[in-house]
Image (cartoon, grey):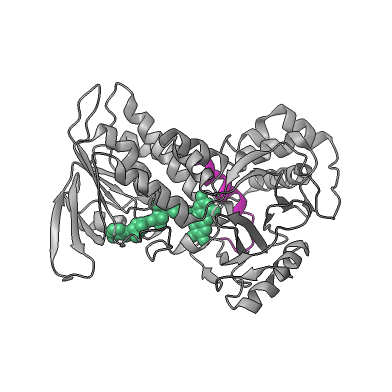
Amino acid sequence: MRAQSPGITLGHVVVTGGSVAGLLTALALAPRADRVTILERDHYEDGPEPRSGVPQSRHTHVLLASGINALGELLPELLPELRDAGAPWLAVPGDLGVWQAGQWISRRNPSAPVMTPSRPFLEHRIREHVMARPGIEVRTSTEVTGLLGTAARVTGVMVRDRGGDPQARRRLPADLVVDATGRGSRTPAWLSELGAAPPEEDVLDTGRAYATAVFTGDPPPADIRGFYLVPEAVQPLGTIILPAENDRWMVTLSGPPDQPPPTDPAGFVDFASRLPHPAPHKWLSTAHPVSRPVGYRRTMNRRSHYERLAPDFTGLLVVGDAACALNPVYGQGVSVAALNAVALARALSGGRTPSTHDLQRAVLRSSDFAWEVATGADSSMPGATGNALRSGRAVRLLTRYLDRLRAHVASDPVVCTANRDVLFLLTPPRTLVTSPRVLRRVLLRSPVPTPRDLPTP
Ligand SMILES: Cc1cc2nc3c(=O)[nH]c(=O)nc-3n(C[C@H](O)[C@H](O)[C@H](O)COP(=O)(O)OP(=O)(O)OC[C@H]3O[C@@H](n4cnc5c(N)ncnc54)[C@H](O)[C@@H]3O)c2cc1C
């Protein structure tokens, strides 16, 4: 990497994977690079369509408040444009029926925003901006098949045209290679081929199974704009029902590995009758399906520690799901991809020249809150496995405290706000145990249950 300070220059950056993380990273690095080339295996459709390289694009996606802030910092014109194009904005919990710890959360608690464009719609809009940026070139139908370089330095990638002669590979040199190829990233294996050690990994898998279908129909009663029934250890079934652009409803059901939601249309709706409150099933029974349910099962949390590779190892940066894939039930991945890109832009804006190691650490830190939230909650799920599973006496005490805290979330505005800000990745999870106001309320007061009927605004 050619680096000068101040105003560091990255030379030629090759980003592998042209999905949300790759596009946003290209945007963050472009002002410091001579040129950026994004390599994407898929062919992009002209419009906002799901594509095979992003199988999760058929599933419900929520953009958390932290992700909204990060996208606003990277692409200020995008948010008003999404709103004008019909992407729903919701206040949470004001607009949503949120069921947690056996009760509805009061909608009168203070709210924060989320956005709920469909995943293809959001990516399409980001893509349009990125492709219009000078200095960024996107090559589609181009598959990366390996890394070039040595055990100490990555110097480019091997590529082949998708649909062309599988043996016809080309070398594409780069000063910096960014891996944004998602959950299926092959970088660990490719590093081994170069003689470098693959990264250490933390994993935690609950085996949660998903199914999603698209519906049309009237909104639920009481001015509710969607449902979120949070799965828990004692009650493992969940749903998230959210509006998307073009008057559609994205309906996702989830269950533990031994209770996967069915992907036949009738079974899908029946499954909703087993949720802990009848309201989502009642609403779903009146709505009209416009797609068949599709399933998804690769929901493991996995964080790869590229920042622990030898400090002088250079030329490679890993972002998005390739670096930190999260259980989708917490709706964090796109927000984390945007936070990764903001962290990179900030790390490159100082006078000091960061190494790729520094940049990788910035990426890691920007996904810390999300990792703690997802693995903290998943550790209490029955049957969860992996080296990131938290256990021991301190963890049992913490779990008891957090169970008590969740009972207060429904009706206590202070506890609800603190919990919401952690889930939206706005504040560190530790605030739930260090804030004196929250501690006092959780430990000294008795929780006040909310009514069982659908909450009114
Ligand atoms: C069921 C489900 C629901 C989810 N719900 C939410 C949600 O509500 N909110 C949220 O924020 N996040 C959610 N996520 C996570 C979110 O989808 C991802 O975090 C987000 O898409 C960012 O991923 P990415 O860009 O890192 O990888 P991906 O989006 O997976 O993209 C990887 C890209 O790399 C390309 N590629 C792969 N291999 C190669 C190769 N060899 N050469 C060239 N290109 C290649 C692929 O074609 C693809 O375009 C969900 C995920 C799942 C699975």
- Judge left or right: residue 356 versus residue 153: right
From the image, which quarter does the C terminus lie in?
A: top right
Relative to residue 385, is residue 89 depicted above or below?
above
Q: Residue at x 24, y 27 (%)?
A: 8
Could you tell me if residue 39 is visible in this image? yes
Residue 447: x and y, percent? 83, 42
Relative to residue 421, is residue 52 depicted above or below?
below
Residue closer to the observer: 379 or 138: 138
Q: Is residue 376 rendered magenta in the image?
A: yes
Residue 281: x and y, percent? 73, 67
Q: How many marks?
A: 0
Where, by quadrant of the figure, is residue 191 drawn? Answer: bottom left
- Judge left or right: residue 451 versus residue 75: right
Please, what is the dominant secondary structure of the magenta stretch?
helix
Residue stretch in magenta: 368-385
Q: Residue at x 37, y 53 (%)?
A: 19
From the image, which quarter does the N terminus lie in?
A: top left
Residue 20: x and y, percent? 40, 50
